[in-house]
């Protein structure tokens, strides 16, 4: 794998998919010599989830047969293999958060296991009031707060409908000054043009964002975490760890 020799070169490099199995991803992550200390999960509870999956799912995406829950269930074994030290889960875009803040998905910000994330999501579906507008900035800021000198993996589950693209672009640039590898998984009918734009955006210290569109039956871990080992190498090269 060809890597940049100088930190300043990373601003011009977009990481590419290169793995054919999740086992190969784990092996590449282990080769970096860096451990993922924090897993940070953000779940989008904006009102657009009510209709942005109409064509694909014929119902709200936070319904009983939610694609969000299916995705979380698929990711459970992946995160067990990653063996992260700390798990945090947040909700955003709902009536209690709008585009101003994030709140813990369950009563405690820090969780014991990935099973708690799934149970927390199930409970939130029954109790959270969908709302908006939606912004990733508060979630990016929370990841910055938690990541201080600790490699963190930020997973965003979203329908991709945000209210202020420039605000979030600037926040993503700021996030690139921290050891955070960000993976966004998009649900519903799209369009996901903004997510694709973030994926290839210039101006960041390194390529810290990958986007994939969720499809039933996909290998979520394989598709979503293709760039994580490269992002970890970049964070190390930049002296963030």
Image (cartoon, helix red, strand yellow):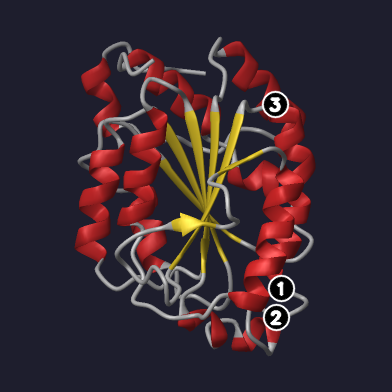
Q: Quadrant of residue 173?
A: top left
Q: What's the distance in space between the residues labelled 1 and 3, CA to CA?
A: 26 Å
Q: Is residue 123 left or right of residue 176?
A: right
Q: Looking at the rendered structure, which numbered label has been put on residue 81? A: none
User: Residue 86's spot in the image, x, y percent?
Assistant: 59, 31
SS for dot 1: loop
Question: Do the CB atoms of the residues marked 2 and 1 lie less than 8 Å apart?
Answer: yes
User: Residue 93's spot in the image, x, y percent?
Assistant: 42, 70
SS for dot 3: loop
Rate crowding at label 3 as few (under 14), some (14 to 19) or many (20 or more) other CA atoms within 10 Å. few
Write the residue at 30% across / 39% down: 175
Write the residue at 20% across / 51% down: 170
Write the residue at 53% across / 83% down: 52
User: Residue 238's spot in the image, x, y percent?
Assistant: 30, 17
SS for dot 2: loop
Residue 102 in the image: above or below residue 153: below
Q: Looking at the rendered structure, which numbered label has been put on residue 83? A: 3
Q: Is residue 130 left or right of residue 187?
A: left
Q: Looking at the rendered structure, which numbered label has been put on residue 63? A: 2
Residue 209 in the image: above or below residue 91: above
Q: Quadrant of residue 138?
A: bottom left
Residue hosting label 1: 66
């Amino acid at each position: 794998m060809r890597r940049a020799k100088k930190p300043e070169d990373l601003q011009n490099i977009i990481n590419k998919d290169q793995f054919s199995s999740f086992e190969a991803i784990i092996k590449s992550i282990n080769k970096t010599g860096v451990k993922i200390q924090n897993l940070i999960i953000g779940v989008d509870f904006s009102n657009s989830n009510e209709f942005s999956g109409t064509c694909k799912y014929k119902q709200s995406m936070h319904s009983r047969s939610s694609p969000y829950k299916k995705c979380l269930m698929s990711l459970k074994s992946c995160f067990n293999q990653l063996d992260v030290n700390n798990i945090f889960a947040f909700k955003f875009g709902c009536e209690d958060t709008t585009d101003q803040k994030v709140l813990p998905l369950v009563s405690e910000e820090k969780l014991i296991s990935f099973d708690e994330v799934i149970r927390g999501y199930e409970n939130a579906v029954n109790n959270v009031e969908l709302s908006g507008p939606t912004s990733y900035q508060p979630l990016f800021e929370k990841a910055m707060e938690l990541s201080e000198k600790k490699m963190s993996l930020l997973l965003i589950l979203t329908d991709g409908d945000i209210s202020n693209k420039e605000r979030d672009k600037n926040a993503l640039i700021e996030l690139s000054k921290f050891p955070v590898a960000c993976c966004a998984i998009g649900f519903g009918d799209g369009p996901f043009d903004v997510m694709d734009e973030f994926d290839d955006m210039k101006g960041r210290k390194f390529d810290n964002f990958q986007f994939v569109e969720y499809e039933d039956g996909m290998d979520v871990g394989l598709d979503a975490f293709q760039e994580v080992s490269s992002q970890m190498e970049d964070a190390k090269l930049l002296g963030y760890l």
